[in-house]
Amino acid sequence: AAAALALPALAIVVDVARLHPYQDAYLASPLRRLQPGASERMFEIEYWGGSYRAVAQWLNEHAEPGATVLVPIAPHCLEPYLRSDLTAHERLRPRVASREHPYVVFMTREAWYRPLGLDRVAAAGPPLHSVRTSLGTLAVVYRPDQLPGPLTRPGGPRSWRPPRSDRPGQRR
C-alpha cells in the first residue's frame, strides 16, 4: 500500500527533475492532458522569471555593445544577469524606440500579450531566441522593426489599465 501511494509522488519528483532549472514551470499530468503541446497558451507556466537568466546569457553573447533591451514583463528578473553595457527598460519613449531598435524580451505569459502589444511583436515573425521546456516556451527574444504603441506609451505596462469601455459598470 505504501509503495502504491509513493508511485505518484515519485512520478512528480521525476517530472520536476526533468524540468530543472525551470522546475517552477511544472504542470501536473492532468493539466498537461487538457492542453497538450504549448502549455503557455492555456496556463502561465513561467511566473517567477527563472528563464530570464538563460535569455540574459544569450543576450550577453549575441547583443552588440550598448544595445537596448525592452523588457515589458518583470524587467527586474533580467537586469541582474545582463552585461553592464546592456540597458534594460520596461518601456521606451517613441523617439528613443525609433532610433534604438531594441531587443524585446518577455516571458510567455500570453494573458499579457494583447494589453501590452506583445501579440503584435510575436505575430511579426519567429523569435531570435527562445527558452523552451517539454511543457512549452518560457521566454523569447525578438527584435521587431517597429514597436507597438503600448510599449512606448507614457506610463507603460506597470500602470496599464484597460480602456474605460472595458471596465465593469462603465458605459461606452
Image: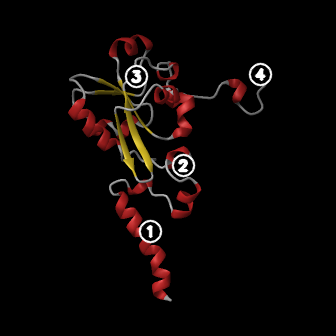
Q: CA distance from mark 2 to mark 1?
A: 18 Å
- Is disc 1 placed on a helix, strand or loop? helix
Q: Residues within 10 Å of mark 3 (few under 14, many from 20)?
A: some
| Precedes in sequence: disc 4 or disc 2 | 2
> Residue 64 has which mark?
none
Residue 83 appears in the picture as rendered: no
| Residue located beneath label 4 in the image | 172
**46 or 88, nearer to the observer:** 46
* x then y, percent, for residue 9: 45, 74
The amino acid type found where label 4 is placed reads Arg
Can you tell which of label 4 and label 1 is closer to the viewer? 1
Residue drawn at the location 45% of the way across and 57% of the way down:
26
The residue closer to the viewer here, 95 or 11, is 11
Q: Give the distance between the C-alpha atoms of the residues marked 3 and 2, in whole angstroms.
A: 25 Å
Tell me, for residue 12, which label it has, or none.
Answer: 1
Q: Say which element carries label 2.
A: loop
Q: Disc 4 versus disc 1: distance between alpha carbons?
A: 49 Å
Residue 154 location in percent, x, y? 50, 18
> Could you tell which of marks 4 and 1 lies nearer the N-terminus?
1
**Res 144 label:** 3
Please name the residue shown 35% across and 22% down the image.
102
Q: Which mark is in front, 4 or 3?
A: 3
Quarter of the image with the C terminus is: top right
Badge 2 amino acid: Phe
Whichever of labels 3 and 1 marks the residue nearer the N terminus, that label is 1
Q: Residues within 10 Å of mark 1 (few under 14, many from 20)?
A: some
Whether 147 is drawn above or below 12: the answer is: above
Q: Earlier in the sequence, mark 2 or mark 1?
A: 1
Label drawn at residue 43: 2
